[in-house]
């Protein structure tokens, strides 16, 4: 799967205790045109044999003050054991 759009931020969803990746992420693209292109081009395509599922996620009330994030890549909670591998 290849996304032909400008990604501005990625938030990996991880376990707050272990820091292990859940397999989901929030990806912000430059504009609504790039978001529509991503939906059309890669939604349902396969990545490592698994289907990619894309949904629009509107900003929730109160999140405006935290966006955009100070870092380009944000993870969940702190990592308790960084032994590697995926959950």
Image: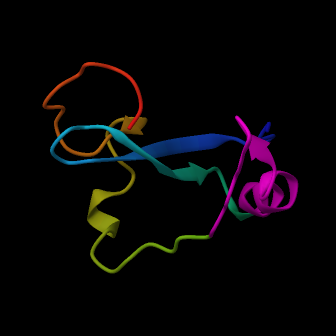
Q: Quadrant of the N terminus?
A: top right
Looking at the picture, tell me which residue is in the foreground, 57 or 47: 47
- Counting the numbered discs, the total is 0
Residue 49 vs residue 72: left or right?
right
Q: Position of residue 66 (x, y in %)?
A: 28, 58
Q: What's the residue at 55%, 42% (across, down)? A: 8
Q: Position of residue 30 (x, y in %)?
A: 64, 50
Q: Vertical placement of 82 versus 36: above or below? A: above
Q: Position of residue 27 (x, y in %)?
A: 55, 50
Magenta residues (range): 33-55
Residue 64 vs residue 79: left or right?
right
Q: What's the residue at 27%, 75% (across, down)? A: 62
Q: Quadrant of the C terminus?
A: top left
Looking at the picture, tell me which residue is in the foreground, 43 or 31: 43
Can you name the residue that lies furthest to the top here? 83
Q: Position of residue 31 (x, y in %)?
A: 67, 57
Q: Vertical placement of 66 versus 20: above or below? A: below
Q: What's the residue at 18%, 32% (across, down)? A: 79
The quadrant in which residue 74 appears is: top left
Q: What's the residue at 26%, 19% (across, down)? A: 83
The quadrant in which residue 3 appears is: top right
Can you name the residue that lies furthest to the right here? 41
Q: Vertical placement of 53 versus 3: above or below? A: below
Q: How is the image coloured?
A: rainbow
Residue 1 vs residue 62: left or right?
right
Asked whether residue 83 is drawn in magenta, I would say no
């Amino acid at each position: 799967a290849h996304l032909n759009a400008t990604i501005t931020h990625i938030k990996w969803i991880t376990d707050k205790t272990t820091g292990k990746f859940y397999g989901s992420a929030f990806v912000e693209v430059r504009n609504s045109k790039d978001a529509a292109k991503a939906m059309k081009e890669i939604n349902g395509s396969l990545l490592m044999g698994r289907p990619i599922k894309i949904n629009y996620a509107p900003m929730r009330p109160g999140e405006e003050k935290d966006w955009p994030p100070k870092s380009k890549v944000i993870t969940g909670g702190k990592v308790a054991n960084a032994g590697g591998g995926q959950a």
